[in-house]
Image (tube, grey):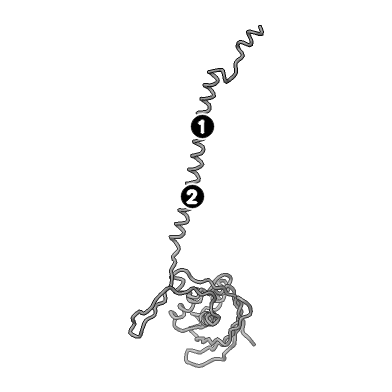
């Protein structure tokens, strides 16, 4: 009996049926593993294509320009030109000029409606953040187009002091003038503004705000 049992005891290595099954399984395992690897590679390539497509789409929407400086002679002929160097730091005198212009734009009242619109459009092109809400509230209560039916207001900036890196104090004189040319009593106003400078990167921004100066917060009050 023991010899009979020993006769039929075979290993997987000696059985042709088991060897065939192992070979069959190995083939299917290899095919399945290869299919899985190709799926991973295809997914990675698809993701990379999507990222590249999104990047190209974003770049296509960005209008970037490089300003050039052209030197001309008295007859108008170009004698030298080249790309303008990027400013490392905005000149303080330019900041003061822009801040003074900003105050004149938002506080001046003109009898010419079109000219008044231009002043307001230029002021809002230099306004961001909470300063926009401040101006909206002010012009809702003090409509310059309605005020122009009674008088005009001339603005003269007296002083512009820097309080910190991005905070300035501006003082100006307002002189109301009636429609018949008489001057009313002038009044001194003072404002504290916060600002930021973001150099423009598109043609539209260069035309409306070439320095990239934006008023982000503003508060004003008449002085005694």
Report the Cα–Cα distance between label 2 and label 1: 27 Å
Q: Residue at x 49, y 40 (%)?
A: 39
Residue 85 rendering spot, x and y as whole percentages: 47, 74
Please say if 43 is above or below 164: above
Q: Nearer the viewer, residue 94 or 105?
A: 94
Q: Quadrant of the C terminus?
A: bottom right
Residue 220 rendering spot, x and y as whole percentages: 60, 80
Please say if 6 is above or below 212: above
Of mark 2 and mark 1, the one earlier in the sequence is 1
Please identify the quarter of the rendering in which residue 140 is found: bottom right
Number of marks present in the image shown: 2
Kind of element beneath mark 2? helix
Q: Nearer the viewer, residue 79 or 39?
A: 79
The residue pinned by badge 2 equals: 48
Q: Residue at x 49, y 73 (%)?
A: 86
The residue pinned by badge 1 equals: 30
- The residue furthest right is 2
Q: Residue at x 64, y 8 (%)?
A: 3
Kind of element beneath mark 1? helix
- The residue furthest top is 1
């Amino acid at each position: 009996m023991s010899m009979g049992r020993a006769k039929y005891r075979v290993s997987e290595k000696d059985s042709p049926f088991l060897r065939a099954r192992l070979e069959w399984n190995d083939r299917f395992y290899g095919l399945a593993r290869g299919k899985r690897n190709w799926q991973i590679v295809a997914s990675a390539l698809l993701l990379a294509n999507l990222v590249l497509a999104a990047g190209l789409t974003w770049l296509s929407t960005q209008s970037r320009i490089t300003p050039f400086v052209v030197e001309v002679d008295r007859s108008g002929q170009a004698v030298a030109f080249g790309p303008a160097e990027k400013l490392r730091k905005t000149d303080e005198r330019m900041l003061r000029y822009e801040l003074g212009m900003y105050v004149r734009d938002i506080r001046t009242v003109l009898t010419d409606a079109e000219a008044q619109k231009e002043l307001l459009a230029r002021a809002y092109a230099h306004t961001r953040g909470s300063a926009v809400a401040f101006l909206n509230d002010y012009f809702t209560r003090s409509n310059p187009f309605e005020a122009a039916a009674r008088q005009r207001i001339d603005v003269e900036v007296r002083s512009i002091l820097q309080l910190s890196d991005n905070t300035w104090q501006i003082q100006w004189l307002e002189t109301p003038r009636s429609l018949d040319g008489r001057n009313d009593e002038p009044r001194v106003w003072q404002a504290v503004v916060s600002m930021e400078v973001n150099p423009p990167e598109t043609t539209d921004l260069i035309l409306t705000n070439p320095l990239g100066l934006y008023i982000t917060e503003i508060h004003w009050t008449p002085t005694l």
